[in-house]
Image: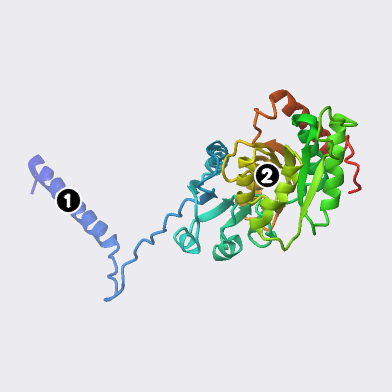
Amino acid sequence: MQKTPRFNRILILILLTTTLLAGCSLGKADQPVPTPLPTGTPMPTATLTPTPEIPLTILLLPADMDQELSNLYQTVVYGLAQTAGYRFQVRNTLSVADLALEPALKVVIVLPPDPGLTELAAAAPQAQFLAVNIPGLTAAGNLSVLADTTRPDITAFLAGYIAAMITEDYHAGIMLPKDDPASPVMVTAYNNGVEYFCGLCNPWAGPFYDYPLVVEIPADAPQSEYGAYADYLINYMVETMYVHPSLATPELLTYLSSSGVLVIGNSTPQKKMGNWVATIQPDVVHAIQTAWPDLVAGNGGLNVPSPLVLADVNPEFLTPGKQKMAEQVLSDLQAGYIDTGVNQ
């Protein structure tokens, strides 16, 4: 039978359709079939990582500190903390219970009085503590201290120089602990400092006592009697005196202020006093800045050195010109250009 063109077209369409259907069936057969999870198999969950707290720095200052000095310390420590990416707090008190509430605490800088630093440092081993001008502490573990690397003869020499410079007829005096082995050294250096300024130091009016005068207080003398020892100098017309830091109690300093005696010391008084001439002390700001990298790195038990500077200067007594002279003498003393006259 002869096939017509129409028949041929129908046959071709049938063949094409059959081929396409066969291809689709093969494609579906090749697709993988997912394996069902066994019954009771837990689905994997994402693990949440807690965000670490920002490290904290605490600056501990006495509530009655001179506001200008307080602002200086706060500015310095705040700048260091901000640079390190730390939080910053200023407090007037700090207890072991407070430390338990601050697990991110990393650095604590403390100025006197001592809040019990030995106990606090032990309660927060993850933090580094720096004691600034707090006597009686030893650097160990996570407690570092501003080291007493200063020579007492340099302090006494400069105190004598300043006293002679600001006191009429050089009526200067010095109060020292009697049983301290450094006291004789300081007496000699104080006298040499007076003479360095005035030479023979001949007064032009009386009374003609052998200035500078010295009073030594026994170790067993109660603090309530310190004023009576000061009266010895006051009765002999001493107008300016250096008071050893171990004797500079708030009660004695208040008594001297009420008596009109000018005072040079080694520690900033807790309350600002009108009779305070100047403080000869380590450069606290420099010491904090020097210690900071080690504190942040977790290095403790350090003795932090610091040069002496003049602080708390009262320009009414130590005018800018006289202060400049005193600072030059201090610089020369620390550089070894001026001899205190005492073997150290």
Q: Residue furthest bottom?
A: 39
Front residue of 336/170: it is: 170
> Residue at the location (56% across, 53% down)?
108
- Can residue 306 be seen from the camera position used here? no
- Can residue 48 be seen from the camera position used here? yes
Q: Is tag 1's residue or tag 2's residue first in the polypeptide sequence?
A: 1
Marks 1 and 2 sit apart, C-alpha to C-alpha, by: 97 Å
The disc at residue 287 is: 2
Residue 21: x percent and y percent?
18, 54
Amino acid at pointer 1: Leu
* SS type, badge 1: helix
Tag in front: 1 or 2? 2
Reading the image, the residue beneath label 1 is: 15
How many labels, in total?
A: 2
> Residue at the location (36% across, 61% down)?
46
Instruction: Examine the rendered structure and indicate whether residue 317 appears above or below residue 60.
Output: above
Label 2 crowd bin: few (<14), some (14–19), many (20+), radius 10 Å: some
